[in-house]
Image (tube, rainbow, N blue to C red):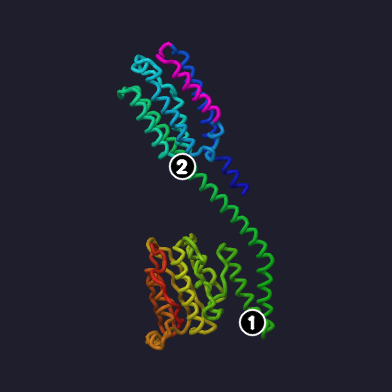
């Protein structure tokens, strides 16, 4: 949090607000000075005096409003620009025709640019374009003809305000990127600290329990096996920083997966974090080094399909079988492959299972992928294991239609 606050203090935006505050005061004094120096060229100086009184009170009383983006609200900007435009339209009523024709400045003079710059700093180049266009139209109406000096001033204000607005937008984007980088750096350092502590304590204890349990045998061997699985899962967590897994399907009872809970994820999620929960002593996950984002509903269905495939490994390949999950992030699709070293599926067994009403592959795997616009291919060679390939287009949003729960095969 301290680093994030430091980024805010280093922002290029705050110096711009301070500069705008000084600019408004100086240009107000400059406009009044021009009036005093050319007093004889005003046919109705009382109009000008009344306007400058309003301009002076408004400028000085609103200095806190242009101190930062939060206080510079849309209503304030609208009133500020209205005062500038009003001064432009009052110029023909106050000054002589000769002064206007000779290219004399308007009543607010360059103070008008301050109102436009406030739009630029607050809302970026689009807001600046709107404000500068309004000023340009007012200048052309006040002059009556598009004289060279008028057009020059209009273009200058237009280009300068839009340029500053664009720079502000780029600076804000850079500030957000820097803040995010600092957050990631802080999180990485904290994870490394925790990893050192865990490695020096918990992981060593789990490894010792696994060795001693295997040596003692009996119930201690089972305890050692569980300790070994937890050691692998914990190593995966501290090295990758992913979401810790729940029960591995190879060790869990059927239906124990948490993926069927509605609303468990919202917005795009990293598919790797959902698959990391399956890692264990007999399940290995290979993944890209960068996040693999998918729509939350689609990612949930893919994770559930992977869980169903691993559940089938647990049921049909035996307790000694190993499984490997491979995640590939292609330009247009995400491919997840689940492979095991079991005995494979005998020819005709899938059709026989569907005939018996056991729809694990048909519904829990293929059905899930079909509902999100993906495909599921199953390749099995007797005595060489089974491979399930899930392919999900990146544009998918989620299941296209509700599907009732089916029994896994």
Regarding residue 12, the answer to whether it shows in the image is no
> Residue 282: image x %, image y %?
54, 76
Give SS at disc 2.
Answer: helix
Nearer to me, 346 or 137? 137
Numbered range of the magenta stretch: 40-61
Residue at 47% across / 68% down in the picture? 300
x%, y% of residue 288? 47, 63
At horizontal 41% and vertical 64% (from top left) the residue drawn is 397
Q: Main secondary structure of the magenta part?
A: helix
Q: Image point 43% across, 66% down: which residue?
A: 328
Whether pointer 1 and pointer 2 mark residues with C-beta atoms closer than 8 Å, the reply is no
> Percent position (x, y) of residue 347?
38, 86
Residue 3 in view, yes or no? yes
* Extreme residue in the top direction: 40
- Left-right relation of 74 to 102: right
- The residue lying toward the viewer, choosing from 248 and 100, is 100
Residue 374 picture quarter = bottom left
Q: Is residue 358 above or below residue 292?
A: below
Question: What residue did someone put label 1 on?
Answer: 222
């Amino acid at each position: 949090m301290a680093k994030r606050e430091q980024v805010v203090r280093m922002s290029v935006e705050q110096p711009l607000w301070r500069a705008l505050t000084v600019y408004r005061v100086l240009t107000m004094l400059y406009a009044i000075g021009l009036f005093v120096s050319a007093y004889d060229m005003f046919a109705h100086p009382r109009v000008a005096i009344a306007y400058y009184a309003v301009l002076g009170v408004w400028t000085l009383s609103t200095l806190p409003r242009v101190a930062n983006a939060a206080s510079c609200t849309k209503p304030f900007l609208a009133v500020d620009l209205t005062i500038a435009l009003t001064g432009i339209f009052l110029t023909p009523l106050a000054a002589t025709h000769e002064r206007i024709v000779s290219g004399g400045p308007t009543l607010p003079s360059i103070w008008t640019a301050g109102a436009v710059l406030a739009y630029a700093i607050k809302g970026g180049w689009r807001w600046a374009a709107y404000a500068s266009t309004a000023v340009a139209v007012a200048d052309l109406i006040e002059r009556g003809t598009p004289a060279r000096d008028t057009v020059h001033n209009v273009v200058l204000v237009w280009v300068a305000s839009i340029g500053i607005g664009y720079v502000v937008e780029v600076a804000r984007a850079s500030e957000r990127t820097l803040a995010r980088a600092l957050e990631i750096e802080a999180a990485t350092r904290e994870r490394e600290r925790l990893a050192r502590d865990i490695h020096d304590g918990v992981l060593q204890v789990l490894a010792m329990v696994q060795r001693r349990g295997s040596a003692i045998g009996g119930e201690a061997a089972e305890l050692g096996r569980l300790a070994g699985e937890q050691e692998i899962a914990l190593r995966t967590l501290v090295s990758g920083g992913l979401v810790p897994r729940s029960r591995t399907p190879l060790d869990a009872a059927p239906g124990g997966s948490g993926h069927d809970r509605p609303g468990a994820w919202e917005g795009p999620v990293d598919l790797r974090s959902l698959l990391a929960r399956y890692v264990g002593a007999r399940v290995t996950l290979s993944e890209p080094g960068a996040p693999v984002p998918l729509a939350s509903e689609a990612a949930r269905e893919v994770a559930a399909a992977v869980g169903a495939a691993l559940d089938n490994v647990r049921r049909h390949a035996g307790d000694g079988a190993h499984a490997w999950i491979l995640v590939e992030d292609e330009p247009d699709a995400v491919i997840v492959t689940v492979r095991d070293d079991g005995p494979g599926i005998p020819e005709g067994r899938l059709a026989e299972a569907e005939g018996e009403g056991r729809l694990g592959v048909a519904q829990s795997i293929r059905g899930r992928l079909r509902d999100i616009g993906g495909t599921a291919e199953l390749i099995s060679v007797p005595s060489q294991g089974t491979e399930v390939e899930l392919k999900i287009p990146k544009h998918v949003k989620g299941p296209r239609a509700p599907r009732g729960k089916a029994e896994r095969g």
